[in-house]
Image (cartoon, grey):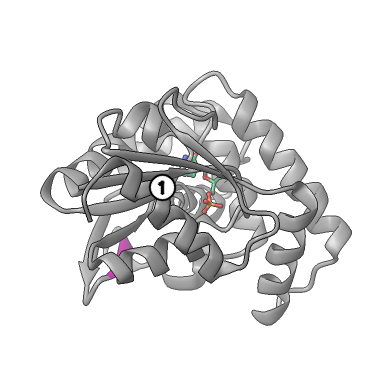
């Protein structure tokens, strides 16, 4: 079974997808981590995130591998585990910029399809229902207000010791939303057959219950 869980940054997809995967005993695939890894490489090389040709010229140098060890997604970049190096606000902005480049998206396409063809997955991203897994049995598009998302992301970053402000996080979210939803290739929009779920007023448990309810309308679990 393939479940596509798409939606904008900070809508709580990863938290919900993780809990959902655990409940259903399937694999959670975080596709944003792949774009973040490309962003990390580009940043380390000192290439401007807006330099499309520069980013494309990096791709042949990148050996990116995604594995699942004890159910945990592990990404290696040229043999190095990326770990939390991809989890900063700065790398999120690099990821957003590189993800608008069609060559980057095709570079990552097979990695995503391969894992879904061999396993039952809940895959979280932006274009999973529209491009990566158009035949997924269940498609959920999760949204929440920019303010609700900024507050959650701010608390996460602060807990990790990042220096940031709520206003700054909200501004980044609005900018990323704009980048992600207006780009020409694979914009972040719901698939025609996706169920849209606004979780602004739901906590994690409530969101997971709701998504399970949606899944039950589509498949037998
Ligand atoms: O989900 P995230 O915040 O880790 O994603 C980082 C960036 O990657 C985000 O700005 C949009 C992009 N992305 C994408 O274009 N397609 C995906 N399937 C996942 C993420």
Percent of width and height locating residue 52: 54, 28
Q: Nearer the viewer, residue 14 or 215?
A: 215
Quadrant of the rendered structure where residue 60 is? top left
Q: Is 92 above or below relative to 153? A: above
Please state the extent of the stretch shown in magenta in the rendering.
72-76
Could you tell me if residue 47 is visible in this image? no
How many neighbours does mark 1 have within 10 angstroms: few (below 14), some (14-19), or many (20 or more)? some
Q: Identify the secondary structure beneath mark 1.
A: helix
Q: Farthest top residue?
A: 184
Residue 142 left/right relative to 107: right
Q: Is 45 above or below relative to 139? A: below
**How many discs appear?**
1
Q: Farthest left residue?
A: 118
For the stretch drawn in magenta, the main secondary structure is strand
Quadrant of the rendered structure where residue 103 is? top left
Residue 63 left/right relative to 91: left
Residue 57 left/right relative to 54: left
Residue at image coords 63%, 61%: 202
Q: Nearer the viewer, residue 56 or 114?
A: 114
Residue 119 left/right relative to 101: left
Percent of width and height locating residue 110: 23, 37
- Report which residue position mark 1 lands on: 214
**Magenta stretch holds residue 156:** no
Where does the C terminus fall, quadrant-wise?
A: bottom left
Percent of width and height locating residue 119: 15, 53
Q: Nearer the viewer, residue 2 or 83?
A: 2
Residue at image coords 46%, 62%: 209
Percent of width and height locating residue 63: 27, 50
């Amino acid at each position: 079974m393939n479940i596509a869980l798409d939606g904008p940054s900070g809508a709580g997809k990863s938290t919900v997808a993780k809990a959902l995967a655990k409940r259903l005993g399937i694999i959670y695939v975080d596709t944003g981590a792949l774009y973040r890894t490309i962003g990390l490489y580009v940043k380390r090389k000192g290439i401007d995130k807006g330099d499309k040709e520069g980013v494309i010229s990096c791709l042949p140098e990148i050996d990116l591998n995604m594995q699942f060890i004890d159910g945990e997604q592990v990404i290696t970049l040229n043999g190095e585990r990326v770990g939390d190096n991809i989890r900063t606000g700065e790398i999120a902005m690099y990821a957003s910029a590189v993800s608008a480049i069609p060559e980057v998206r095709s570079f990552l396409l097979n990695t995503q399809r391969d894992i879904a063809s061999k396993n039952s997955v809940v895959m979280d991203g932006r274009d999973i229902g529209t491009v990566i897994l158009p035949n997924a049995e269940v498609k959920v598009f999760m949204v929440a207000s920019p303010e609700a998302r900024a507050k959650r992301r701010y608390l996460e970053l602060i807990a990790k010791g990042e220096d940031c402000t709520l206003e700054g996080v909200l501004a980044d979210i609005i900018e990323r939303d704009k980048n992600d939803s207006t780009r020409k290739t694979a914009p972040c929009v719901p698939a025609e057959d996706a169920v849209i779920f606004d979780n602004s007023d739901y906590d994690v448990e409530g969101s997971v219950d709701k998504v399970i309810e949606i899944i039950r309308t589509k498949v037998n679990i």
